[in-house]
Image (cartoon, grey):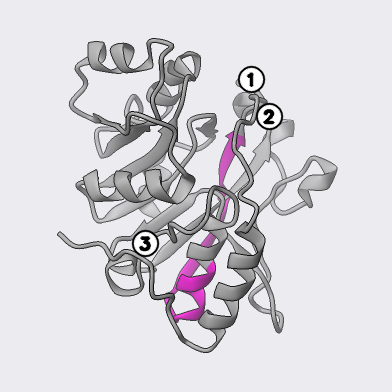
Amino acid sequence: MISIVTGTLNRKNLLPGLIENTVGKSDKLELVLVDGGSDDGTIEYVKSLDNPQVKLVEVGGRSSYPHFMNLGIKESKYDYVCQWNDDVLLVNEWEEVINELDGSDFYIFNWKYGDVNSITDSDWISGKDVAHTNGGWCLTDNTHLEGGELVMNYGIYNKKIFKEIGMYNDEYHYYYADGDMCYRAYVFGYKHKSLWDIKVCSLPTAKTALHGPNDVAIYEKNRKLYNNKTLPENIEYYKK
């Protein structure tokens, strides 16, 4: 069972596709949708579905990425939490994802920019790890190299990670919070699995995320802490 967690804000037009692509595909999923104060009918639409697999968390105002992800994690009911966005679609069947859950601690999906028609286009789907600057796939796992990078844009964490080394760091506004979480898990010895063949289509939507002025500095500071096996003092831990 997997809890898919994402935030949304005034993107009602994306929700039918999101819901159909997730809980509409499998009864082994729940979608935890954290709304940051939408006034476009999003809240009314989600409530009208009366879908037991969709949990709506109302923040009441715009929230930072780590804040809404942590809220979603606390409201989720399964041990596996999927880091997701409201403007992406899984190319594979979710059963393929579930079949990959082999006891690793976290799992990283491959992704690429495309549109709703791309997920049935065999030419678009082909390939694995071409640099996204060339329109290719974007899974970054160079951990076999000294100082190599590991990046999760979309993927799954076992909740034990959030219990033991903390959840998303609420110091960030948006960017780098996901990279911080992934790198922390890796450096502290949690086993990861890069799923090159589990593919995600990122749709061409208007991006409304705001850079925090200190996000880069926080990220660099935290990486030094992690490399010394030290955790930040201000992170929240999952307790349930």
Please provide percent x and percent y for residue 124: 72, 33
Callout 2: helix, strand or loop? loop
- The span shown in magenta is 183-201
* Disc marking residue 117: 1
* Disc marking residue 114: 2
Question: Which residue sits at x=60%, y=66%?
Answer: 219
Residue that protrudes farthest toward the left in the picture: 240
Question: Which residue sits at x=61%, y=25%?
Answer: 120
Query: What residue is disc 3 on?
Result: 167
Name above or below for residue 27 compared with residue 160. Answer: above
Give the distance between the C-alpha atoms of the residues marked 3 and 1, in whole angstroms.
35 Å
Disc 3 and disc 1 in contact, CB within 8 angstroms: no
Please provide percent x and percent y for residue 70: 34, 51
Question: Which residue sits at x=62%, y=44%?
Answer: 111
The residue type indicated by label 1 comes to: Asn
Callout 1: helix, strand or loop? loop
Q: In which image quadrant can residue 161 be found?
A: bottom left
